[in-house]
C-alpha cells in the first residue's frame, strides 16, 4: 500500500483556504533524489490580483498551476528553458477582469496567456448561436462564447500530495465546477503529477455530469508553445492518418504544413485538423522541435480518449504573441453545431463521467529529439498520410 502526505489548500465545503503553503525535500525527505519543492502564494497587483499560484519544481522541471483559472498551467522551465509563450498581456489574468461576451463573444482572449489552457466543458470553438433539438424534440438556440467557461472558473477544492515511496510522485489536484441554474452541471477533477528529476508532467482529468439529465461535453487542451522551441525552421510532426486545413486561410499554408516561419507582423493564424495513427491500444505522440533539432516539446495521449488533434499556427510578431498550439481534444475547434453533426460531441448520462491521462515531455538534447522522431516514423509506417489541400467537409465546417 502506497504511503502519502496530503495537504488541503482549498476546500470551500469545510471553509479551508491557505493564502500560502510550502513543502519541499528539506521538510519531506524522499531518498537521494534531487531537491524539489511545492509552493503556493497569492499574486497581487495588476490583472493578476487575487490569483492563486502553485509552483511545482521537481529539480529539473518546474511549472505553475492556476487554481483560479480552471487549473490551467501558466508557464514553466526545464533546465532553464522557458515553457509557455509571451502573450500580449501581463498575466496571469484574474477571471474577474475577463468579459467573455466582449467583442462578439471573443472576450475570453483577454485572459489567454497560459502554457496549457482547457477549452470547454460544455462547449469550445468559435462563438455564435448554437441551434439544436433536445431528446424531447424541443428546439433550442443558445449563444455561446469562444472556447467555453472552464478556464475562467476557480477551483473549489485543491490538494497537494507527495508519494513517500518510489517513484516519489508529486501531485496537485483541483476540482472546478461549471454549472448554474438551467446550465449543465459538470465538474472537472484535474491532477498534475511529476517525479523528482524527470522531464515529464502527467495530466489526468475526469469530467463528471452531476446533473439529473444527460449533458454534452467538449474539451480541448490548448498547449501553447513559444520560444525557444518555436522559431524559424521549427517543425511539428506526428503520425498522420488524415489532415485538413480548417479554413481557406489555412489552405494557403498546406505546402509548409510541418514547418514554421519566424515572427511576421500582421500574420493571420492558420489551423489544421488531424486524425492521428496510434499503436494497438491507441497511444500516439506529437512533437514540436526547434531548427537545430535539439529542443522539443512532446505530447503523448490516447486516441480513444482524445480522438482529435489540432495544430494552431500564430507566428505573428513577438509583441503580438508568437506562438503555436498543439491541441489534443474530444473535438475539432469548429462551431459546436457542426461538431455535433459529425458525432464529435460526447454526451454524459446523469452521474456519468469521461476521463483521460496524457503527458507533456520536454527534451533538450539531439538524442532525445531523435528518439521521438523514430517513434513517429514507426507509427507512420502503418499508413501513408492523407493530406487534404482544401478544407474537408468531415473535418472542417468550411469544407
Image (spheres, helix red, strand yellow):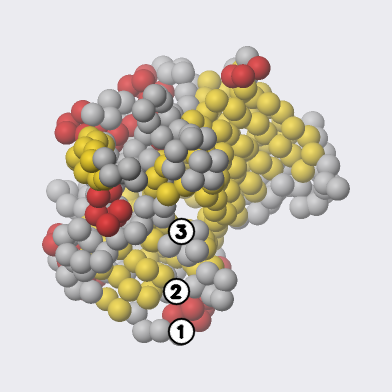
Ranked by sequence position, the earlier of labels 2 and 3 is: 2
Q: From the viewer's perspective, is 379 left or right of 326?
A: right
Give the CA separation, mark 2 to mark 3.
Answer: 12 Å
Q: From the viewer's perspective, is 121 left or right of 37?
A: left
Residue that carries the numbered disc 3 in the rendered image: 306
Q: From the viewer's perspective, is 167 left or right of 56?
A: right
Q: Cβ–Cβ below 8 Å for labels 2 and 1?
A: yes
Name the residue located 79 percent from the left edge and 31 percent from the top edge: 27
Tell me the element at label 1. loop
Residue that carries the numbered disc 1 in the rendered image: 382
Q: Residues within 10 Å of mark 2 (few under 14, many from 20)?
A: many
Q: Nearer the viewer, residue 25 or 130?
A: 130
Q: Is residue 322 visible?
A: no
Ranked by sequence position, the earlier of labels 1 and 3 is: 3
Name the residue located 17 percent from the left edge and 64 percent from the top edge: 399
Tell me the element at label 2. loop
Name the residue located 33 percent from the left edge and 73 percent from the top edge: 242
Residue 93 image-quadrant placement: top left
Using the image, tell me which numbered label, if any, was put on residue 277.
2
Q: From the viewer's perspective, is 55 left or right of 311?
A: right
Give the CA separation, mark 1 to mark 3.
Answer: 20 Å
Using the image, tell me which numbered label, if any, was put on residue 148.
none
Give how far across and how far down residue 257 sits, in percent: 27, 69
Amino acid at each position: 500500500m502506497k504511503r502519502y502526505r496530503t495537504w488541503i489548500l482549498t476546500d470551500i465545503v469545510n471553509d479551508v483556504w491557505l493564502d500560502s503553503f510550502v513543502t519541499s525535500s528539506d521538510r519531506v525527505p524522499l531518498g537521494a533524489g534531487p531537491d524539489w519543492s511545492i509552493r503556493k502564494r497569492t499574486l497581487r497587483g495588476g490583472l493578476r490580483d487575487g490569483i492563486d499560484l502553485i509552483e511545482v519544481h521537481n529539480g529539473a522541471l518546474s511549472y505553475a498551476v492556476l487554481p483560479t483559472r480552471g487549473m490551467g498551467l501558466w508557464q514553466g522551465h526545464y533546465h532553464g528553458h522557458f515553457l509557455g509563450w509571451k502573450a500580449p498581456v501581463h498575466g496571469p489574468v484574474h477571471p474577474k477582469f475577463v468579459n467573455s461576451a466582449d467583442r462578439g463573444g471573443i472576450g475570453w482572449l483577454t485572459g489567454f496567456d497560459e502554457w496549457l489552457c482547457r477549452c470547454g466543458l460544455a462547449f469550445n470553438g468559435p462563438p455564435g448561436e448554437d441551434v439544436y433539438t433536445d431528446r424531447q424534440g424541443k428546439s433550442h438556440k443558445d449563444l455561446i462564447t469562444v472556447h467555453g467557461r472552464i478556464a475562467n472558473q476557480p477551483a473549489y477544492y485543491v490538494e497537494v500530495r507527495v508519494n513517500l515511496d518510489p517513484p516519489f510522485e508529486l501531485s496537485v489536484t483541483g476540482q472546478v465546477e461549471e454549472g448554474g441554474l438551467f446550465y449543465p452541471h459538470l465538474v472537472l477533477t484535474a491532477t498534475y503529477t511529476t517525479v523528482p528529476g524527470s522531464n515529464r508532467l502527467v495530466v489526468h482529468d475526469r469530467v463528471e455530469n452531476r446533473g439529473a439529465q444527460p449533458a454534452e461535453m467538449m474539451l480541448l487542451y490548448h498547449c501553447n508553445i513559444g520560444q525557444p522551441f518555436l522559431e524559424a525552421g521549427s517543425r511539428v510532426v506526428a503520425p498522420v492518418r488524415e489532415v485538413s486545413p480548417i479554413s481557406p486561410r489555412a489552405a494557403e499554408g498546406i505546402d509548409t504544413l510541418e514547418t514554421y516561419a519566424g515572427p511576421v507582423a500582421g500574420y493571420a493564424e492558420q489551423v489544421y485538423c488531424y486524425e492521428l495513427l496510434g499503436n494497438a491500444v491507441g497511444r500516439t505522440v506529437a512533437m514540436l522541435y526547434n531548427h537545430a533539432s535539439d529542443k522539443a516539446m512532446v505530447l503523448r495521449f490516447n486516441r480513444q480518449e482524445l480522438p482529435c488533434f489540432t495544430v494552431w499556427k500564430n507566428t505573428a510578431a513577438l509583441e503580438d504573441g508568437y506562438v503555436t498550439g498543439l491541441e489534443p481534444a474530444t473535438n475539432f475547434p469548429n462551431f459546436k453545431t457542426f461538431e455535433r453533426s459529425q458525432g464529435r460531441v460526447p454526451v454524459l448520462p446523469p452521474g456519468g463521467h469521461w476521463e483521460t491521462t496524457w503527458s507533456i515531455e520536454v527534451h533538450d538534447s539531439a538524442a532525445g529529439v531523435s528518439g521521438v522522431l523514430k517513434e513517429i516514423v514507426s507509427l507512420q509506417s502503418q499508413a501513408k498520410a492523407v493530406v487534404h489541400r482544401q478544407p474537408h467537409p468531415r473535418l472542417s465546417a468550411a469544407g
